[in-house]
Amino acid sequence: MAHLSHAVLLLEQSRDLAEVASIRDMVLAAETYARAQRLADEAVHYATEVRVRATRKAGELLGSIELPARCHARDSPPTRTALGPPQGSSASERGAGAVDHPSSVR
C-alpha cells in the first residue's frame, strides 16, 4: 500500500508520457501481485484505481501531443486513384505478353 501511495504522488507530479507509463507498469505489477497473493479486496481495488488514474493521465498526455499537419488521424487514407498505379503494373513490365507457345519451344 505504501508503494501505491508513493505511485499516486509520482503520478500527480509527472508531466512526461514515459514517466506515466513507468508508473502504470509498476502499479499493474502491484495489482497483479495483490490478486495473486489474495490480499484484501481493498488493496486490489486501490491498485486498480491507481492504474486507471495512470491510464487516464497517459491518455490526456497523448491527446495533448501536437501532430504534424499531414499526420492527423482524422484524415482519410489516400485512395488508389490518388496514389496512381503501382510500380510494375503494366503488362509489359510484368512480362505478361511473353508467353512461350508450345509450338515455338524446341
Image (spheres, rainbow, N blue to C red):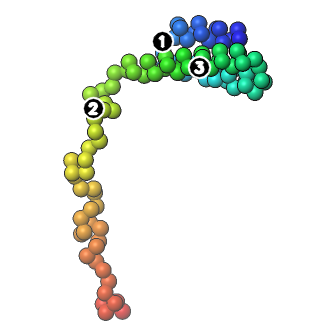
Quadrant of the rendered image containing residue 100: bottom left
Q: Amino acid at mark 2?
A: Arg
Alpha carbon of mark 3 to alpha carbon of mark 2: how far? 33 Å
Which of the numbered marks, if any, corresponds to residue 70?
2
Q: Secondary structure at mark 3?
A: helix
Residue 31 falls left or right of residue 83: right
Q: Residue at x 49, y 19 (%)?
A: 56
Q: On residue 106, which mark appears? A: none
Residue 22 location in percent, x, y?
Answer: 58, 20
State left or right for residue 21 relative to residue 102. right
Residue drawn at x 31%, y 87% is 101
The label shown at residue 15 is: 1
Is tag 3's residue or tag 2's residue first in the polypeptide sequence?
3
Question: Of marks 2 and 1, which one's residue comes earlier in the chain?
Answer: 1
Where is mark 3, residue-wise?
51
Residue 69 seen: yes
Give the residue type that dot 1 points to. Answer: Arg
Q: How far is mark 1 from mark 3, CA to CA?
A: 16 Å
Q: Is residue 95 above or below residue 34?
A: below
Would residue 71 be seen by someone viewing this image from the given angle?
Answer: no
75 with respect to 33 (left or right): left
